[in-house]
Image: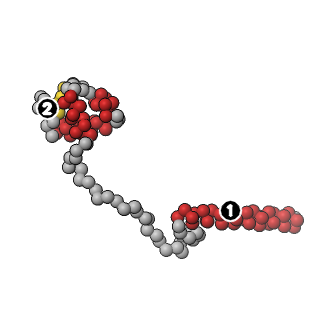
Amino acid sequence: MAGFVDTTVAEIDSRLEELKAEMSKLEAARSALTGRGSGRSRATAAPTRARRSPRRPARSRGGRRNGTRGDQALALVRERPGITIPEIASSLGIEPNYLYRVMPNLVKTGQVKRDGQGWHPADGK
């Protein structure tokens, strides 16, 4: 029985040495990636703040800009009265689901109207 215990303890010690070497390699890789120390003990380490990249100021959602999808869709509606959302999407190279949000905004602003599946300029141009 003593031989079994000695052999098992030796195997455990050997495996622990392998794991320590692996852990050392992983800690070095982590440190290289994060630029921080090993972080072995999270409980004793000082809390760190997440680094954020500089952000641009948020744009207001209400303002319209030149070249928006709404402007592009409106131009297509004026060129081809009765055009459908899938046709507009295909012309713009975008997914139709986006236009299902854009077109109602053009209706609210009085720029287009819907007739069946097709869209028409509200001003009749």
Residue with the mark numbered 1: 22
Task: Check disc 1: other Cα within 10 Å, few if <14, some if 14-19, many if 20+.
Answer: few
Closer mark to the observer between disc 2 and disc 1: 2
Task: Check disc 2: other Cα within 10 Å, few if <14, some if 14-19, many if 20+.
Answer: some
Residue 5 place in picture, x, y as percent:
83, 65
Secondary structure category for the residue under label 2: loop
Residue 4 place in picture, x, y as percent:
85, 63
Which quarter of the rendering shows the C terminus? top left
Residue at point 26% right, 54% down? 59
Look at the picture and state if 30 lies above or below 100.
Answer: below
- State how many labels appear: 2
> Within the image, what quadrant is residue 96 found in?
top left
Which quarter of the rendering shows the N terminus? bottom right
Amino acid type, residue under disc 2 in the picture:
Ala
Residue at point 74% right, 66% down? 17
Residue at point 21% right, 35% down? 74
Residue 43 place in picture, x, y as percent:
53, 72
Observer-nearest of 4 and 73: 73
Residue with the mark numbered 2: 122
Secondary structure category for the residue under label 1: helix
Amino acid type, residue under disc 1 in the picture:
Glu
Residue at point 18% right, 28% down? 120
From the viewer's perspective, tell me whether residue 68 is left or right of residue 44.
left
Look at the picture and state if 39 lies above or below 72.
Answer: below
Q: Earlier in the sequence, mark 2 or mark 1?
A: 1
